[in-house]
Image (tube, coloured by chain):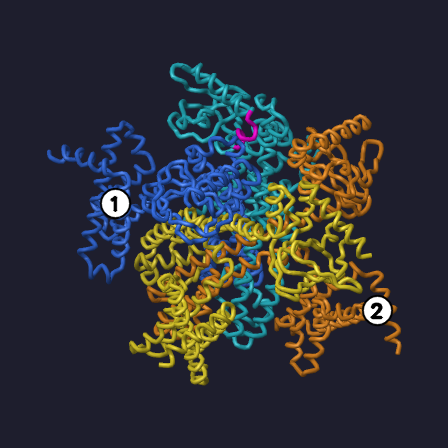
Chain colours: A orange, B yellow, C blue, D cyan
Amino acid sequence: MSKPSALPVMARFVIATSGRNMTKAAHVAVVCGVAMMVMLTVDPVFAALHYPIGAVLWACLAFFIFEWMIRLRHAFDAGHRWAYVFSFRGLVDAASALAIPIALLAGIDPKSAWLFGALWMLKVVPGIPGLRQLRRVLVLESRPLLSVLVIFLMVLFLASVAEFVLEHDVQPAGFGSVPAALWWAVATLTTTGYGDVVPITPLGRVIAAAVMICGLGVFGLWTGILATGFAAETRRDNFLRTWESVRKVPFFATLGPAAIADLTQMLRTIDLPARTTIIRKGQVGDCMYFIASGEVEVDLPGKKVALGEGAFFGEMALLGNNRRSANITTTRVSQLLVLDLVDFRLLMARHPDLAETIDAEAKRRSLENK
Amino acid sequence: MSKPSALPVMARFVIATSGRNMTKAAHVAVVCGVAMMVMLTVDPVFAALHYPIGAVLWACLAFFIFEWMIRLRHAFDAGHRWAYVFSFRGLVDAASALAIPIALLAGIDPKSAWLFGALWMLKVVPGIPGLRQLRRVLVLESRPLLSVLVIFLMVLFLASVAEFVLEHDVQPAGFGSVPAALWWAVATLTTTGYGDVVPITPLGRVIAAAVMICGLGVFGLWTGILATGFAAETRRDNFLRTWESVRKVPFFATLGPAAIADLTQMLRTIDLPARTTIIRKGQVGDCMYFIASGEVEVDLPGKKVALGEGAFFGEMALLGNNRRSANITTTRVSQLLVLDLVDFRLLMARHPDLAETIDAEAKRRSLENK
Amino acid sequence: MSKPSALPVMARFVIATSGRNMTKAAHVAVVCGVAMMVMLTVDPVFAALHYPIGAVLWACLAFFIFEWMIRLRHAFDAGHRWAYVFSFRGLVDAASALAIPIALLAGIDPKSAWLFGALWMLKVVPGIPGLRQLRRVLVLESRPLLSVLVIFLMVLFLASVAEFVLEHDVQPAGFGSVPAALWWAVATLTTTGYGDVVPITPLGRVIAAAVMICGLGVFGLWTGILATGFAAETRRDNFLRTWESVRKVPFFATLGPAAIADLTQMLRTIDLPARTTIIRKGQVGDCMYFIASGEVEVDLPGKKVALGEGAFFGEMALLGNNRRSANITTTRVSQLLVLDLVDFRLLMARHPDLAETIDAEAKRRSLENK
Amino acid sequence: MSKPSALPVMARFVIATSGRNMTKAAHVAVVCGVAMMVMLTVDPVFAALHYPIGAVLWACLAFFIFEWMIRLRHAFDAGHRWAYVFSFRGLVDAASALAIPIALLAGIDPKSAWLFGALWMLKVVPGIPGLRQLRRVLVLESRPLLSVLVIFLMVLFLASVAEFVLEHDVQPAGFGSVPAALWWAVATLTTTGYGDVVPITPLGRVIAAAVMICGLGVFGLWTGILATGFAAETRRDNFLRTWESVRKVPFFATLGPAAIADLTQMLRTIDLPARTTIIRKGQVGDCMYFIASGEVEVDLPGKKVALGEGAFFGEMALLGNNRRSANITTTRVSQLLVLDLVDFRLLMARHPDLAETIDAEAKRRSLENK
């Protein structure tokens, strides 16, 4: 009876320490588990390392079962049990934990059963950066993407039927049925071109050439649509991320809404861990920084100056002095807004008052430093 | 004599119920018919399911003949008979209905005759969404696309002649004539690369390498042109669709023409069926909605509020309150205009009066709800 | 002595009738000549049609010699002889005329000598539309394109050396030397993938996989650069073509320079031959037209109205009346400026005075037509 | 003891003459060395040219050792020794100088040892134009690029495991283990398609078809991201290069900051060596030039006029006079700013005062020339 009472304690401990650590451990387990699963299929390696591979696989499985149970418990405690169980994450966790045991119990050959370990890879999906952005592009551009897919499928089918008619007497092995011809068509239209099945009649080759050229066109349309969508999404994503940060910088508070909107489109947000060197003395600089949160330390000769939230630095580089004059490092986790030289100049042209403020502050600081 | 008198009745019935239903039935028939046609060519499947496959094919054919006759009758009644007969749709309908019977009567082997069923697929073409948009891109960009095609063809020919000269003594099978070399060239220039014919002389390989690199270039140009055209067309299409809807929202009527043009470029039109949940309580929101037509129901605690044409909702998400505070569902087929968070902020900067109106309405509503 | 005196007369006649006709004749000759040259290499066809093929080839050659002499004569008369002789066109004309006779005189086998007919294809180059535009893109983007090419070549070489080291003991046939490995590398990096030479050692395959992924990257960069350049060039080209036409429309003369620049970016120039129907009654319209040069005829009920240079038509479609109300055809070669519905609305927002003028004219015309 | 004292003298001499010359010599050595290294692996060539190849290779090696020692000495003298030693350049120089001697001393077969000459190629990397620009794109777009890479890897793994399950009984040679299946997957997903391993079960082929289509999608996303990033980077790069030059032209000094920012986005900087003809009399012109530094000579009938820094020329082409009226050549290394016809017209619309100044100067000059 120790387990039921022990689990909550462990769960609480794991969740307390967890978040990032739990995720990191899971990622390590996924990489180890999948690597072992791959080795399992390589006969000589498996023969030589039978036991270690098995041990790692069982350890990974145990970890994933344990992780799933903790998450389940946690979800039950927090009262949103079904939300978790039927979320993508919950389903993947369940499959990761249960697929292999069920397969083993069902009497499937162990070497085959462990192949379900490939499902573990799906645990990484929610952690992929920019996946949300990618999904938005696919959703927003779904109409044209679908059109291209339908065209792709029609070319595929019509070409297959045509090649079947032309080639099935000459090459019964490769073009003996429309599904067989479809295999040729998909390898050709995607320009993969295995070459295992190739038309040999003159007319069959003319049609194949047309299919290849259509392949280029489909490719081009696909790319064009995705490129268009991606450009828009990147701009949007950057604006949203930056907008939040801009509001934290008091320096910008005096600006009118038009200038703020302009500025937000120009700034780029970066997140830095503690003790990261942002600027190195003597480097050529082409941007200035605003501190949205955190703190940096300027390593001036003889003294160290700390700059906190809302301050800016690196502005000398934009005012004619190309070389950075001091090392600057973060003292804790910080979020900075980067203003590029090009954008600074465009901004200066459109909002001279902002430029003047930066200019004045830079002069004051440069006097102070002397 | 029953058929001539029965047909108009059926036709009237079909047309009355029709539109979407007729189209749906035709799509189902196309999918079934083409699937059976494919199975016909797979010998083991055909041997096992001789009769069911034949039955489905005859049923599909009967349907298409019937559909064509109804459409013909309808076109005659409406007085634009030739317009229909010689339109793309009319020709496809005629071919779908007549090709197989004519082939069977002409004494062609039934298994071959039924392959004309591939023509049925063309019935889907007019229903492909965004095809019109795609065609516009191809028409508007036809000049540069043609240039690239001509360059493609010249590289193809010159490379073929060169390889023929270099390789035809060494490989009479693969490069025995210029048309044979053209087959190699098209598979190489499109980067398909079957590998059934490959140059083996050193100089022949140098030329082949140049052809491959040209292939990348042609690809790049093609994609560049289509991407450029597609981006412009997508913007245009969205503007047109949205413009119509914007005029239906009285809220925007007070805006000046510049603001309306701005707004139209930012809004996105979506069409929703009845009983669709647009906003779910507790979700993170990043856009607001205007109702161009239809009606939605806000599920507030204790009461349900209906919002009709011209109303807006979801504005809280843009004014700092990230979580949606109520479920909102459509009560009938509705057309909504979506304003994204990013665009809302840009709009707010450029047209502060519009922002104030939304702000005021949001405050009033939030007070009312308390 | 008849030829020297006859030539100038013929030359004068040809040049007088010429321009387009000469070019058309040359294009026909190129297509015929190249087609015959291709057939020459197909043994069964050549055996069957020995004489006709030879006759057409000699006729084409005679035409090209004749054309070159006329052009030379014309260039001498006009005094820019060397400019023509050493221009691309002059060199191609000389090669087209002289390569085959010289080869035949030099005792080369006739079937091989006639292959120089491939050079005839180069005569088409100056006539390719948009080639100038393409060349500008390549010139302006030459720096990044070269960078990508250098990276491409470095990956190619390093991968070849690596595969040579790893594979030359196992596969002396395919990877026996670095040039042999280069052949594999170029087919892989361009994602052509013939499959005639394939690494088989595990490490060799890992490197090959890296090369393939680099191939995608090179492809992507190439396309990105060309797409960027092409978009800019297309905009520029359209602006230049349209600017000339806009100046011919008196209606725009009253506009300020800002509005004209705006308008020029929005309009699209089209050139139409005589007797072309531009608008068909009952069609859905989404653009209006300005006449830069030429004349159109409006087919109103009971009368025909001619509109000349500077007039506009089709504006009803932009003012709410979607269906075209009359057929409109060109009466002679005309150049029109097309204003799209979307652009019309944006223009209306930015330059309300222009919109009013169009509106007033449309109302006057619509009254007049009643 | 002569070497230590001789080296500084030589080093000083080399460094004095050096910069460009040293780099040029190194590039020649790289090309020669790598070419010889390639020939070394081609057995018949090596047998015939044993001694010359060896001599060139030793000469190149000697040059690289010498170059490295000079650079080391120079770095020691300048006091930033470690900065050089551990920079990319320093490491490549060290590897180029030491790898082959160490390999030879370690008793590796000389023919294999010389293959380390492939490292020499890396010496070219710092000289690739636009590499910095490319690196910036990769860094700025690293988030979405990584997402696509992760998706690519997941599709790769899942497809490999699926094909392993489906095919390893049928084709133990090609799909006998997951790593073997990975080899197939990477060749398919990149659309390379060697065709050495091809699925043959129906379900295996369906999955392969899905992988190919995913390959197109990955390709499209990759290209879209790189195209977006590249377009932004090109604009930025051009702005920065031009900004510096614009400040050198006194003519622009009177403009307000908004006009300067506009202008900088429109101008294009070109660097020309001495005695280069910029404009040829009689050519069709579509741009004007400003001299940022250097000098040009206008070849007017009867006299030669020199134009120095800050002057402009070619403006006639933009004011209606299409044909260039005089030859213009640089007299020394010059930097010019090019203003395209299209941009000139847009500029004229937005900043009429600038246009007037150019107009007035053009008229004055044209009077003077008469």
Secondary structure character of the magenta stretch overall: helix
Instruction: Locate residue D4 relative to residue C265 in the image: left or right.
Output: right
Residue neighbourhood size for the residue with mark 1, other residues' Cα within 10 Å, grouped as few (<14), some (14–19), many (≥20)? few
Vertical order, B7 against C207 (above or below): below
Residue picked out by circle 2: A77
Q: Which quadrant: the C terminus of chain A? A: top right
Instruction: Give the residue type at disc 2.
Output: Asp
Q: Is residue C158 visible?
A: no
The magenta segment? D346-352
Instruction: Locate residue B277 relative to residue D25 in the image: left or right.
Output: right
| Chain of the residue under the numbered disc 2 shown in the image | A
Q: Is residue C254 visible?
A: yes
| Spot occupied by residue A3 in the image (x, y as percentages of width and height) | 86, 75
- The verdict on residue D147 being magenta is no
Residue picked out by circle 1: C25
In this figure, what is the number of numbered marks?
2
Observer-nearest of A154 and C268: C268
| Spot occupied by residue D41 in the image (x, y as percentages of width and height) | 48, 52
Tell me the CA gap for discs 1 and 2: 86 Å
| Chain of the residue under the numbered disc 1 shown in the image | C
Identify the image quadrant of residue B278: bottom right
- The verdict on residue D351 being magenta is yes
